């Protein structure tokens, strides 16, 4: 069984559907803690709460846990262990993004996500032995649409920011750093560069670990 720790209710259906698509019959269990992201953004220590959620998911039967919040990614990896691995949602994505080196557009709607994501990409590049140039792209104002529940406007805001960045600064690959951005990739299918999202690759990694 795969456990998921979310900071937004919308992710339950998204990741549940992905598990059922990638591994029909694989069980999944979810915990949602919306204030956890706000506290992390405010600089509060979140390690104990993340660990408590992981423990609860394990108690519910999870053999692997996915943290779907990029801001909490470093904390999630710290609380993981060999007994029950904790997958940060963006690590599989990062490994693919840096594989060929070059310029990586790192797209975020929350400034608090930028640091953890760029650190992760730099770490992944170091492990892969590639050289990357990280180009931050902040979707100003888009997060307000997400919080208001207007996902269509949110994804259009991400699309607009990506198109502007690629046209003005160029990129070899675009990383949509937050799981909530994934549907925007469909709006960007005509771009001449790959647009990578995290949910699918994270679920695939979790399934692999769950069945190991």
Image (cartoon, helix red, strand yellow):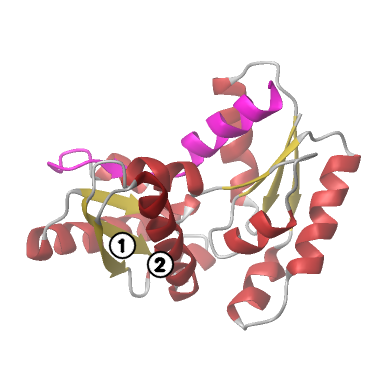
**Which residue, given by chain and number where applicable, does mark 2 sit on?**
109
Considering only vertical position in the picture, is 206 above or below 127? above
Left or right of 25 on screen, residue 97: left
Considering only vertical position in the picture, is 92 above or below 178? above
**Picture coordinates of residue 205, whole percent (x, y):** 56, 32
Local SS, label 1: helix
**Picture coordinates of residue 83, whole percent (x, y):** 80, 39
Q: Nearer the viewer, residue 61 or 155?
A: 61
What residue sits 55% from the left and 22% below the top?
A: 22
What residue sits 44% from the left and 65% below the top?
A: 119
Image quarter where the C terminus lies is top right
Left or right of 144 on screen, residue 196: left
**Which residue, given by chain and number where applicable, does mark 1 sit on?**
157
- In this rendering, the count of numbered labels is 2
Of label 2 and label 1, which has the lower sequence position? 2
Instruction: Please give the range of residues in magenta.
Output: 189-212
Crowding at label 2, few (<14), some or many (≥20) Cα neighbours within 10 Å?
Answer: many
Q: Nearer the viewer, residue 188 or 146?
A: 188
Q: Residue furthest top?
A: 25
Considering only vertical position in the picture, is 150 above or below 28? below
Q: Looking at the image, do the residues carrying marks 2 and 1 touch, with CB atoms under 8 Å apart?
A: yes
Left or right of 93 on screen, residue 165: left
Q: CA distance from mark 2 to mark 1?
A: 9 Å
Q: Magenta stretch containing residue 200, yes or no?
A: yes
């Amino acid at each position: 069984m795969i456990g998921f720790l979310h900071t937004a209710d919308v992710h339950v259906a998204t990741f549940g559907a992905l598990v059922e698509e990638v591994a029909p019959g694989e069980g999944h269990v979810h915990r949602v803690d919306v204030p956890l992201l706000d506290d992390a953004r405010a600089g509060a220590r979140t390690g104990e709460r993340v660990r408590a959620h992981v423990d609860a998911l394990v108690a519910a039967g999870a053999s692997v846990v996915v943290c779907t919040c990029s801001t909490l990614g470093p904390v999630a990896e710290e609380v993981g262990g060999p007994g029950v691995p904790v997958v940060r949602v963006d690590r599989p994505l990062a490994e693919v993004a840096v594989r060929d080196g070059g310029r990586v557009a790192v797209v975020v709607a929350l400034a608090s996500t930028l640091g953890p994501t760029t650190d992760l990409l730099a770490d992944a590049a170091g492990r892969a032995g590639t050289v990357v140039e990280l180009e931050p792209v902040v979707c100003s104002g888009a997060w307000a649409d997400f919080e208001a529940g207007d996902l269509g406007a949110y994804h259009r805001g991400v699309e607009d920011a990506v198109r502007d960045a690629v046209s003005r600064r160029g990129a070899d690959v675009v990383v949509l750093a937050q799981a909530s951005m994934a549907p925007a990739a469909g709006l960007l299918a005509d771009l001449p560069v790959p647009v990578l999202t995290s949910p699918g690759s994270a679920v695939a990694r979790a399934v692999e670990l769950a069945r190991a």
